[in-house]
Amino acid sequence: MREQPSVSTEVLCACLQEHYNLIPATLDFLPLGLDYRAGVYRIVSGQGISYLLKVKSGSLYESGCLVPDYLRDQGIASVVAPLPTRNHALWARVEDWTVIVYPFHEGETSWRGMTDEQWKETGFIFKQIHQATLPSSGIESLRKETFDPTNYAQWIRTFEAQHLHESSGESAAQHALRSSWIENQSTIHAVVASLEKLAAVLHRRNLPCVICHADLHPANLLRDRMGRVFVIDWDEVMLAPKERDFLFIKESPTDSETLPGTPAFFQGYGQADIDWIALTYYRYERVIQDVIACAENVCFRDDLGEESRADEAQLFQDVLAEGGEIDAATHASTHLSPELTVPIRRNA
């Protein structure tokens, strides 16, 4: 969130003292992240210890706290987990907000700049995560992969029927998103068609599921000054095939190019038999998830400023461009049979 949450610092400080026995000497908002329902702060206590405070609106996905806490207890030290409250809970509530406190790790989360050694370390970390077994009692709130794109398709149809051609009173960002949607409507429909076709294939399989972070990319891999890697932001964690965490892999038509770090990642992870049908499904799913999220933020979030809406409208265009790149690689891939590749059509 780039705009500070509406909850006051006085309320937050009182909550921290009550639930964490933590009295902030400073509490500074950090305009970081793409989650417009969450804000983060840096706390420095009177003893000079730094903490990260995350404040979230709406309902809490409890597994986003429970799973990293469990993995940390299993000895995976690179997983950043919430700190407990005085009552041993992993979060607290104040007004309409959920308050979560983490240890603060100084470092960077830029999309570029990870070394091969850091990618190798990341591979080793995720091998540990994927090999971890859940407690015998399970984690009730933890989502499990269903390969069901029905809700995505329904959202797209509803948006197009009710909002796509409404132009009265729209902001500049809303106009930009709506125009881009109309221009690329066939692309969006082709992504949904690809999801539905691949889902039908995957329903006939019984792929093993593991604990997946489900949002693995460099911005969620914090690198500290010593070069160590920490896995942050577990809001999307789920049980899914391991391919859910391999989205950063990118093939060229000749299999000769990959995103930076991909070979090093698998040096740390070890040999992995990749199900390319599942990975392709996840690539398309990520595109349509981002399309929907951008449209929601631009068109339906009254609490966002115009600058944030404009950023989302630009991101919407970038996402559609990425969808075309994914299709080009998928259509040329030797890992998929021709009947499973659905070309994304772009308007001239």
Image: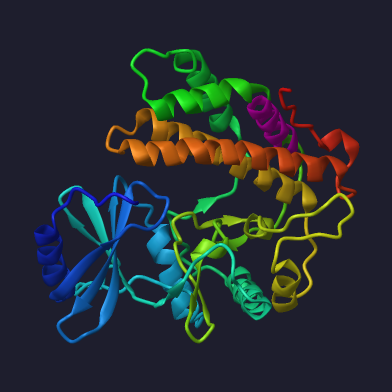
Instruction: Tell me where the magenta segment starts and ends, as one range.
Output: 187-199
Residue 167 found in image quarter: top left
Q: Is residue 317 above or below residue 170?
A: below
Residue shown at 11%/69% (left/top)? 18
Q: Position of residue 200 (x, y in %)?
A: 73, 35
User: Taking the image as drawn, is residue 288 in sight?
Assistant: no
Residue shown at 11%/58% (left/top)? 11
Q: Position of residue 342 (x, y in %)?
A: 79, 32
Q: Is residue 124 above or below residue 292?
A: below
Left or right of residue 95, residue 304 in this image: right
* Magenta residues, dominant SS class: helix
Residue shown at 30%/67% (left/top)? 90
> Looking at the figure, which quarter contains the C terminus?
top right
Residue 257 found in image quarter: bottom right
Tell me, yes or no, whether the highlighted magenta stretch contains residue 227.
no
Residue shown at 38%/52% (left/top)? 61
Tell me, yes or no, whether the highlighted magenta stretch contains residue 197.
yes
